[in-house]
Image (cartoon, rainbow, N blue to C red):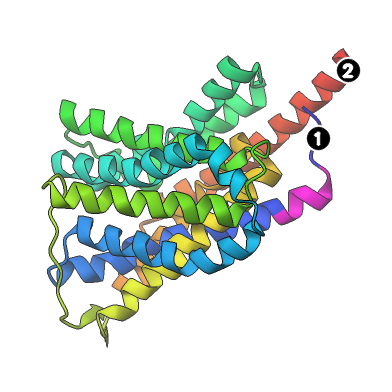
Amino acid sequence: MAELPASRLLPGLGFAVLSAMSFGLSGSLAKGLLDTGWTAGAAVTVRVLVAAAVLAVPAVLSLRGRWGLLRRNAGLVAVYGMVAVAGCQLAYFNAVVHMQVGVALLIEYTAPVAVIGWMWLRHGHRPGVLTLVGAVVAAFGLVLVLDLLSGADLSVPGVLWALGAMAGAATYFVLSASEDNGLPPLVLAASGLTLGAVALLVAGAVGVVPMSASTAPVSYDGATVPWWLPLLGLGVVTAALAYVTGIAAGRRLGSRLASFVALLEVLFALLFAWLLLGELPRAVQVVGGVLILAGVVVVKLGERGTAAAAGTST
């Protein structure tokens, strides 16, 4: 594994941070909708539909008539849409039915550890000591950020659903980093979101996910906005922009490093919760955020050390 050149590292980190920021906004925007009577399934379905519609034309232009790419990668697109988009969301929503949101999120965000294991078993990319240390530091930081030290009740169904969400998130990181398929990031994101939207609509139609909506105004920390505005933000910013930049980051950084930088989503989620919902983070959460950043730095050092070791062994 060669060390990433600055021409890939810096843009990759920029895309990864922008993706984490975009994904981190989704919870706060959705919370306002949920408080007015929207179900989580309905909000996510509209979010994915809007994102697919926004990316449709740019994706077609990016494809430049190479429809054969989609046919050759039909399996990849299907897995991305069904597992990384729809499956991950559905599993997470079912998890929070049985357990606290923070606990479910923590389990889902063990995805970077799963990515390390996958890259090791499937591709022989054995993680170095620093990479493993970074994983532990970042995981402990998440425990503090999510304020779980006070104790939380666990349920077996909830844990299983959350592990399903973790598998979906890990799949997202691995597939986003693949450059061998030839699919432009816009095409992979748009086609995956389209399939994910279809899957969510089917899940709603058969009653797997409750679907109900409201046209009541939505309130955010004293400000009231029309119902369609947060939906537009969910679709354009937290889905279309987030997925495209996430794929772009994965292809520049690799799935392992990109998945750890994506942990910043938790920090951005806390920031937006403060700005939009008036929820202030506690001091222990600030410490946890620092540990997450430290874990990402250590992982990067581990990537560099692994690359150096690979270079000396050849």
Q: Position of residue 271 (x, y in %)?
A: 43, 65
Residue at which label 1 appears: 3
Label 2 element class: helix
In the depicted view, which residue is nearer to us: 178 or 287? 178
Q: Residue at x 33, y 60 (%)?
A: 27
The disc label shown at residue 307, or none: none
Residue 213, quarter of picture: bottom left
In the depicted view, which residue is nearer to us: 236 or 192? 192
Can residue 286 be seen here? The reply is no
Can residue 288 be seen here? The reply is yes
Q: Residues within 10 Å of mark 1 (few under 14, many from 20)?
A: some
Decide if residue 219 is on the left or right side of residue 206.
right
Q: Residue at x 29, y 47 (%)?
A: 199
Q: Position of residue 285 (x, y in %)?
A: 40, 51
Decide if residue 131 is on the left or right side of residue 74.
right
Residue stretch rendered in magenta on the structure: 5-11
Q: Is residue 8 magenta?
A: yes
Measure how far apart labels 1 and 2 are at the Cα level.
13 Å
Label 1 element class: loop
Residue at which label 2 appears: 312
In the depicted view, which residue is nearer to us: 69 or 154? 69
